[in-house]
Image (spheres, grey):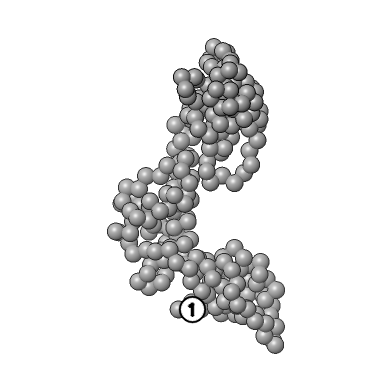
C-alpha cells in the first residue's frame, strides 16, 4: 500500500456527484492499461480504503451518493469503477513513459505479423517505426495495442507495402536437436504437420505470423548448431 504522501488522485464525476480516491501512481497506471496481463488487487492500489468527495479536505462521499452512481457502497468495487472510468492525475513523466512503451508494443506487433507482399519478407522494426514517424501516427497509452495497430497500419500502408499474413515454414532438425522441436517452435506458431525420420531427425511444417520468418530461422539454426534446414512454402 502506497504512502498517502506519495499517492495521486483518481477522480470521477457523475450525476452531479464527485468521487475521489488516493492511489499508487504506478499501480494505477498498470491497472488502467488494457494490455496489462498482471492481476492487480484494488486494495494494493489504494493508499486508504476510503471514497472521498474531496480528498484534500478529507470529506468522505456519502453512501447515498455511491449507491446512486455505482449501485453499491462497497469501497473496493466503487474504487475499481473510479479507476476504470475516471481520470487519474498521472505525472508528465509517467504519461510519456506509458506512451513510449505502448508505441514499442505497436511497432513490435506490426513487425511480428506484417510482411512485404511484394517479396513475402518481413519489415524490420526500424522501417515500421520510421514509417509511423513519417505518417505522424500518435499512440494513446490507454488504448489497446490491437486497436492502435489497425490505426497505424492504415496510416503507413501509403508509405510502405505491408499486410498481415500467416506463412508456412518447412523445417528439418537433425536428431541432436529434434527433441527440442516442440518447445522451440511453440513461441512462433503451430505445427500443422510433422514426421519423424528413421535417422532420428524431425521434419515439420509450421504456420506462423509472416514477420517471424527471420527469427524462426535464427532459432532453428541456434538449437541445431547450424544444421537445421528451413524453407518458406509458397
The residue that appears at 53% across and 37% down in the rendered structure is 32
* Label 1 element class: strand
Is 232 on the left or on the right of 200, as rendered?
left
Q: Position of residue 44 (x, y in %)?
A: 65, 31
Q: Is residue 172 above or below residue 18?
A: below
Residue 172 appears in the picture as rendered: yes
Q: Position of residue 38 (x, y in %)?
A: 62, 44
The residue that appears at 48% across and 46% down in the rendered structure is 144
The image quadrant where one finds the C terminus is bottom left
| Residue that lies at the very extreme toward the bottom in this rendered image | 198
Q: Is residue 49 above or below residue 56?
A: below
Q: Is residue 99 above or below residue 152?
A: above
Q: Position of residue 17 (x, y in %)?
A: 49, 19
Circle 1 is placed at which residue position? 233
Q: Nearer the viewer, residue 158 or 175?
A: 158
The residue that appears at 42% across and 70% down in the rendered structure is 121
Is 167 on the left or on the right of 153, as rendered?
right
Q: Nearer the viewer, residue 10 or 84?
A: 84
Q: Residues within 10 Å of mark 1 (few under 14, many from 20)?
A: few
Q: Position of residue 60 (x, y in %)?
A: 58, 15
Residue 5 appears in the picture as rendered: no
Residue 140 is drawn in which quadrant?
Answer: top left
| Count of marks overlaid on the render | 1
The image quadrant where one finds the N terminus is top right
The residue that appears at 44% across and 37% down in the rendered structure is 96
Amino acid at each position: 500500500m502506497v504512502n498517502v504522501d506519495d499517492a495521486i488522485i483518481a477522480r470521477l464525476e457523475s450525476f452531479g456527484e464527485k468521487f475521489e480516491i488516493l492511489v499508487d501512481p504506478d499501480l494505477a497506471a498498470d491497472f488502467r492499461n488494457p494490455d496489462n496481463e498482471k492481476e492487480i488487487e484494488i486494495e494494493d492500489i489504494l493508499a486508504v480504503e476510503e471514497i472521498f468527495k474531496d480528498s484534500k479536505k478529507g470529506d468522505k462521499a456519502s453512501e447515498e451518493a455511491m449507491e446512486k452512481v455505482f449501485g453499491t457502497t462497497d469501497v473496493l468495487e466503487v474504487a475499481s469503477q473510479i479507476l476504470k472510468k475516471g481520470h487519474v492525475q498521472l505525472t508528465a513523466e509517467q504519461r510519456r513513459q506509458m506512451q513510449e512503451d505502448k508505441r514499442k508494443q505497436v511497432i513490435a506487433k506490426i513487425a511480428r505479423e506484417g510482411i512485404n507482399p511484394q517479396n513475402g519478407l518481413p519489415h524490420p522494426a526500424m522501417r515500421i517505426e520510421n514509417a509511423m514517424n513519417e505518417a505522424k501516427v500518435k499512440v494513446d497509452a490507454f488504448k489497446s495495442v490491437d486497436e492502435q495497430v489497425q490505426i497505424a497500419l492504415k496510416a503507413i500502408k501509403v508509405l510502405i507495402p505491408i499486410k498481415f499474413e500467416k506463412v508456412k515454414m518447412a523445417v528439418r532438425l537433425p536428431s541432436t536437436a529434434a527433441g527440442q522441436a516442440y518447445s522451440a517452435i511453440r513461441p512462433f506458431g503451430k505445427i500443422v504437420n510433422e514426421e519423424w525420420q528413421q535417422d532420428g531427425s524431425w521434419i515439420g511444417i509450421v504456420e506462423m505470423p509472416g514477420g517471424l520468418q527471420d527469427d524462426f530461422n535464427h532459432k532453428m539454426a541456434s538449437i541445431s548448431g547450424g544444421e537445421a534446414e528451413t524453407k518458406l512454402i509458397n
